[in-house]
Image: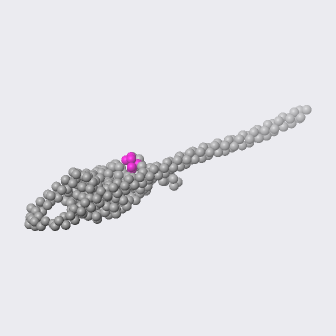
Amino acid sequence: MFSAIFNTKARVLRAAESGDVPELARLLENNSANIASRDWYGFSPLHLAAREGHEGAVRLLLEKNADIAAKGNYGFSPLHLAAMHGHEGAVKLLLEKNADVAARGKARVCVRAGGGVGASPLHLAAGNGHEGALKLLLEKNADIAARGKARVCGGLSPLQWAAMNGHEGAVRLLLENNADIAARDEVGCTALDEAQGRGHDAVVALLEEAAAARQQATVGQGGIHRAEAERDSSPAPALQAAEEEARQAREELARTRQQLDAALQAALEEARRAGEELAREREGREAAEEEARRVGEQLAREREGRESAEEEARRVGEELERTREHLDAVLKAHTSHLHGGVAQRH
């Protein structure tokens, strides 16, 4: 019984992940509790449908009141996964149902793709360069200044994620929405430092151009006297040397961070593959158990059929035996009667 229930839940998850809407609808119709099924990573059917971008499955699950705020083992909601993979249709459907744009993940690593402790859907869309999803989230007033909290690269804003991964379009979109160019992370790096440290020249040029334009706008708004004062008061050589040393240190930190991110990403990918392999093995065992159960039931039915046939044969045999005994008695009586008649004639 437990195995059958477990297999049904596994089928619900597979239907959601593959976007098989008719099968998903049938399974949910038979048992609405299946909508809360979870996989190895704590993902619900809605998580999987959103991650794969299956809009029909997402729509059906939302109509069936799937938990839109459910979080997996890493704290990611369905909106996190849809934004991470750039599925605009799924993002739009979830936002129409008021999915929380401020939800934060809790993963213990900080990967180049943009995940990490405290990552919002906006972080994930920006970190992966998904401009369509990014725009939808910004239209819902997602916090453009939100900071992540991962221990390796904590305090990164969505702009820093996009710059770090070289996503020029996402950087441009964030700048158009007034993202803070000068914001620094916990080790003092800006979005420009992140882009320079990873050799993303197009992003570097874009950030420098935006910084210059904003500086010019500041001057045009009455900051000209302050700009002149800053220009006239040249920093001392020692200060210039210290600033250059700090810049080089930030670039070195950015390069080190890139290496750590790559190593962590590889470890996470290996863990994911191992988890999927275990899940496949478990599904294989479950399928074997289900087949064994089915064969056992078939054998039981065949045995019951044989027993029923044997019982019927026994009953017929008894009936034949009674009939024979009756015929023997009748024949004996008839024979006795005939003998009696013959004796009287003699």
Can residue 74 be seen here? The reply is yes
User: Which corner quadrant of the image does residue 143 belong to?
Assistant: bottom left
Q: Return the residue nearer the eye: 100 or 189.
A: 189
Asked if residue 100 lies left or right of residue 314, the reply is: left
**Residue furthest toward the front?**
237
Q: Position of residue 329 (x, y in %)?
A: 79, 40
**Residue furthest toward the right?**
346
User: Which corner quadrant of the image does residue 261 belong to?
Assistant: bottom left
Q: Quadrant of the C terminus?
A: top right
Q: Return the residue nearer the eye: 323 or 121.
A: 121
Asked if residue 329 lies left or right of residue 309, the reply is: right
The image's colouring method is: one colour
Asked if residue 192 lies left or right of residue 232, the reply is: right
Q: Return the residue nearer the eye: 176 or 135.
A: 176
Asked if residue 5 lies left or right of residue 267, the reply is: right
Q: Return the residue nearer the eye: 203 or 14.
A: 203
Can residue 137 be seen here? The reply is no
Q: Residue at x 29, y 55 (%)?
A: 127
Q: Is 20 inside the magenta-drawn segment?
A: yes
Q: How many marks?
A: 0
**Which region shows up in magenta?**
15-21
Q: Position of residue 252 (x, y in %)?
A: 28, 59
The chief SS type of the magenta part is helix
Q: Residue at x 27, y 54 (%)?
A: 198
Q: Position of residue 238 (x, y in %)?
A: 19, 66
Q: Position of residue 121 (x, y in %)?
A: 30, 57
Q: Residue at x 72, y 43 (%)?
A: 318
Q: Is 333 inside the magenta-drawn segment?
A: no
Q: Residue at x 66, y 43 (%)?
A: 310
User: Which corner quadrant of the image does residue 107 belong to?
Assistant: bottom left
